[in-house]
Image (cartoon, rainbow, N blue to C red):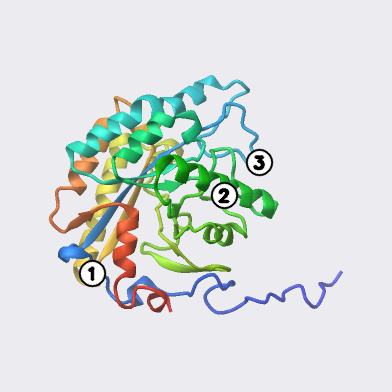
Amino acid sequence: MSLPDDYLDYPWRQYGNDHNRYDWSMLTDRPPVQWPNGKRLAVWVNVSVEFYPLNQRGIPFKVPNGMTMPYPDLRHYSLRDYGNRVGIYRFLKAFDRYNVTPTFALNGQIAERYPSLLSRLADTGAELLAHGWNMDHLHYGGQDKAEEAEQIKRTLDTLRKHSGQSIDGWLSPAKNQSENTPDLLTAEGVRYCCDWVNDEMPYPFRTEQGDLMMMPLPTELEDQFVIGNNLHSEDSWVQQVKDAFDFLLEESATQGGRMLGLNIHPWMMGQPHRIGCLEEVLEYVSGHDAVWQTGSGEILQAFQGQQGSGREASS
């Protein structure tokens, strides 16, 4: 049977991208970026503070690091809970020791399940991002738009109310989105999103409500991806972070400012046999004069404040 004439018709088929969400460009073709005070490499340490329900629905799929054994999977639930009871406080001590300014990405339900933890993180003065409602409420293709809109609004309203922050950034659970997610985010006042990892620098992403800036947060360097998914050792993770850091720092000497995003999880790197590895990484990235270590929002603000760093930079 022959295909219908319109089978290959697609309104956004064009050179570079088959959509109109952002303009295609190569990083090497964009104007060089200069970070404040002559710094060359901006380092953003992102901490994912998450709640995994014990009885997960798994819609439309089981989230990475979620419950894997028959209910009640106390083995994995309690390990995730450990991060919010023990591991996160080791993180805070390490950040203070190495003068690191983190960014905390929180599930909205953290405010209900761990109110004292939310208050403690807000009191640090670090920026808080919204990380979805919990790690079993994914955003996905085909999801009812009204349902997703309510999910996003509930998350943002809860975190804004209990933290006192404006909550300008967003990281979806599992970095998964529906076709409507970016539009729904900007409708609720979200300024930037960390889901898309197709770049190493911020770039504008079109939505129905105007531009939503994308702040790529690399999956390849995440502790859970390297250690939990790829089954590499903690020492290997340290070396991979150092290698990425060294390469970007060297590249920035001739091509303009670069950005390194590092996403970590308290239930994993907050373990007593791993916290030393995190401290080694923090000491390494904070020990270079050419590094600007700060939160994601400040990096984005500096990026957008430069001539040619907005829409023109990705044309």
Q: Please, is residue 254 above or below residue 226 in the view?
A: below
What amino acid does circle 2 point to?
A: Lys
Give me the C-alpha separation between circle 1 and circle 2.
Answer: 35 Å
| Mark sitting earlier along the chain (1/2) | 1
Quadrant of the drawing holding the N terminus: bottom right
Q: Residue drawn at (65%, 41%), measured in percent from left and top? A: 59
Judged from the image, the secondary structure of the residue bearing numbered disc 3 is loop
Q: Label 2, on which residue?
A: 153
Q: Would you identify the image quadrant in which residue 181 lies?
A: bottom right
Q: Please, is residue 201 above or below residue 271 in the view?
A: below
| Mark sitting earlier along the chain (3/1) | 1
What amino acid does circle 3 point to?
A: Ile
Would residue 224 appear left or right of 126 to someone viewing this image? Answer: right
Quadrant of the drawing holding the C terminus: bottom left
Q: Label 3, on which residue?
A: 59
Q: Would you identify the image quadrant in which residue 42 lies?
A: bottom left
Mark 3: give few (<14), some (14-19) or many (20+) Cα within 10 Å: few
Q: Residue drawn at (59%, 41%), measured in percent from left and top? A: 137
Mark 2: give few (<14), some (14-19) or many (20+) Cα within 10 Å: some
What amino acid does circle 1 point to?
A: Gln
Task: Judge whether residue 157 can be spotted in this image.
Answer: yes
| Mark sitting earlier along the chain (2/3) | 3
The one of 111 and 249 positioned closer to us in this rendering: 111
Q: Label 1, on which residue?
A: 34
Q: Please, is residue 190 above or below residue 240 in the view?
A: below
Judged from the image, the secondary structure of the residue bearing numbered disc 1 is loop
Give me the C-alpha separation between circle 2 and circle 3.
Answer: 19 Å
x then y, percent, for residue 309: 34, 73
Would residue 183 appear left or right of 258 to someone viewing this image? Answer: right
